[in-house]
């Protein structure tokens, strides 16, 4: 996202206001999309941590497992959806972790 922001700033400096909006529009939209996904991930992770804290105080292992399944596990799918979308947007060279498709299909 930082690279895109610098790129957009450079477009303004290079082309001025007249051409800037036309040239930078798609990049600005990608920045918004990345920012939305990152914000959603952060919120979902924070919410999941709170649910984990509630589940962790349950002493009975079976009841704790049920609480995790019912209240914690659903967050994992939502977080994963946002991360999958980010994997498609972020260049492989700057993505620090193996992407899901690489884990599945790379030998």
Image (cartoon, grey):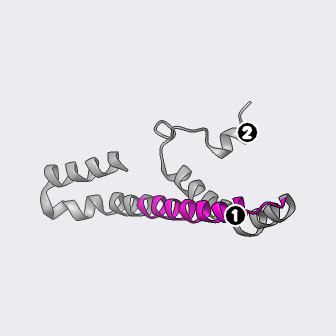
Q: Is residue 75 something one can see in this rendering?
A: no
Q: Tag on residue 84?
A: none
Image mark for residue 105: 2
Residue on which the image places disc 1:
72
Rendered image quadrant of residue 29: bottom left
Residue furthest top as drawn: 107
Q: Is residue 4 at least partly visible in the picture?
A: yes
Which is more N-terminal, label 1 or label 2?
Answer: 1
Disc 1 residue crowd, few under 14, some 14–19, many 20+, Cα 10 Å: many
Q: Residue, x 47% and y 58% (percent of image)?
A: 38
> Which of the two residues, 62 or 12, is positioned nearer the viewer here?
62
Give the magenta range. 35-60
The C terminus sits in image quarter: top right
What residue sits 76% from the left and 69% below the top?
A: 70
Give the main secondary structure of the magenta stretch.
Answer: helix
Q: Secondary structure at mark 1?
A: helix
53 magenta-colored: yes
Q: x, y percentage for residue 35?
A: 41, 60
Left or right: residue 32 versus residue 45 is left
Q: Residue 34 at what x, y percent from top left?
A: 44, 58
Q: CA distance from mark 2 to mark 1?
A: 28 Å
Question: Along the line of sight, which residue is nearer the eye, 46 or 34?
Answer: 46
Q: Nearer the viewer, residue 29 or 41?
A: 41
Residue 84, compared with residue 75, is above or below; it is above
Q: Name the residue at 64% across, 65% down.
A: 51
Residue 65 falls left or right of residue 52: right
Eyeballing the image, is 4 above or below 52? above
User: Quick check: marks 2 and 1 in contact, CB under 8 Å?
Assistant: no
Q: Judge whether residue 58 is colored magenta.
A: yes
Position of residue 41 in the picture relative to residue 74 (left or right): left
Considering the numbered disc 2 on the image, is that residue within a helix, a strand or a loop?
A: helix
The percent position of residue 1, horizontal first and vertical second, equals 37, 50
């Amino acid at each position: 996202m930082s690279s895109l922001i610098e790129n957009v700033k450079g477009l303004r400096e290079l082309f001025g206001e007249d051409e800037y909006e036309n040239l930078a529009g798609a990049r600005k939209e990608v920045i918004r999309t990345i920012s939305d996904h990152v914000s959603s991930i952060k919120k979902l992770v924070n919410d999941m941590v709170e649910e984990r804290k509630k589940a962790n105080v349950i002493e009975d292992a079976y009841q704790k497992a049920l609480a995790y399944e019912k209240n914690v596990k659903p967050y994992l799918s939502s977080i994963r959806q946002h991360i999958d979308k980010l994997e498609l947007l972020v260049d492989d060279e700057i993505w620090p972790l193996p992407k899901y498709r690489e884990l599945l299909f790379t030998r």
